[in-house]
Image: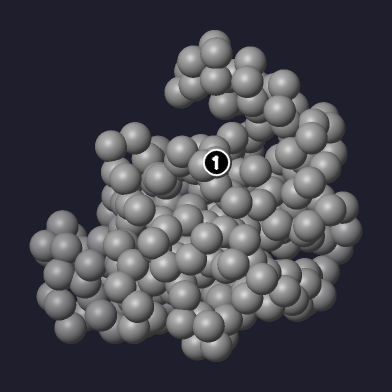
Amino acid sequence: MTIALDRGIKILKELGNAQGLTLSEITKRTGIPKSTTHRLLKSLCGQNLVRQNRLDQRYRSNVLLPQQSEIHIPPADQPLLEIACKYAESLTSQVLWPSDIFIPIGDELFFIESTRALTRVYIPHCRIQTKINIINSAAGRVLLAYSDDQTADRYLQQTWLEKTSSEIEKKQFLEAWPTLRNKIRQQGFAFRAPTYFGKPGAGDGLRAIAVPILNGNKVRACINLVWPSLYASEEAFARDYAKLLIQTANEISSCLKD
């Protein structure tokens, strides 16, 4: 029992200091036999201490250990993630287009899960547990629009501190935002900024439509659908899929407890 415990802790420490690891990588880093590692991972997943992401099939820790360097999903958000994944998978099975899940942690928004690996439609994969551009991404914009003024201001102040936007871009955004915010709240969803195609240099060629997952008046998460920009205009895609995406978010929200 002591050996198994020591090995389990060793696995958790390795997972806490990496952006997700495969079974083979965990085996190599820990020196634990592959069959034993697989058995321990199965047990850790069963206890919700570890999860295996749908998108890249890598294992990640659900618990925070001392000196852990990977992004930590707060315990209160872990049940939310499980619920959201279930509904996102169902949504993708209906519409074929993949869905991404985002969770605000602190004053930032992170890309946490995706069904991109589950669809027959080819959509470029991207790195899990990465920080999202608040002012240009669809998820970031819907998060801002549905947050109260004080919370939205915190997100924006963090964004300005990172200096990923020029002063001109900042000025243009702040001037346009009140009108855009009202539009997002009226229609119930947000699109990416017109010139935004993922991280700088990435150019994923995708468009996205995102909606909030609410618990009362608080945005607990955001969920989107993504598609190649050549497939359809934003307006056409929204006509076909916005209602179902909003319904999915509402169903997730109804499962959450205060």
Q: Is residue 62 left or right of residue 256?
A: left
Residue 22 position by quadrant: bottom left
Q: Nearer the viewer, residue 115 or 44?
A: 115
Q: Is residue 163 above or below residue 18?
A: above
Q: Which color mode does the image show?
A: one colour
Give the quarter of the figure containing the N terminus: bottom left
> Amino acid under label 1?
Ala
Position in image of residue 29 (x %, y %): 15, 57
Q: How far across and how far down the image is residue 245, in percent?
A: 66, 72
Where residue 231 appears, as percent x and y from the top left, is 42, 67
Name the residue nearer the viewer: 224 or 67: 224
Which quarter of the rendering shows the C terminus? bottom right
At 55% from the left and 88% from the top, the residue drawn is 94
Q: Quadrant of residue 23?
A: bottom left
Mark 1 burial class by Cα count in 10 Å: few <14, some 14-19, many 20+: some
* Residue 235, x across and y down, in percent: 62, 61
164 versus 179 height, above or below: above
Near-viewer residue (22 or 17)? 22
Residue 103 makes an appearance in the image: no
Image point 84% across, 53% down: which residue? 186
The residue under the point 75% across, 49% down is 184
Image position of 169 (left or right of 190)? left
- Residue 50, located in which quarter of the rendered image? bottom left
Q: Is residue 72 left or right of residue 156?
A: left
* Residue 178 position (above or below residue 27): above
| Residue assigned mark 1 | 193
Report the residue at 68% width, 77% height from top: 244
Mark 1: secondary structure: loop
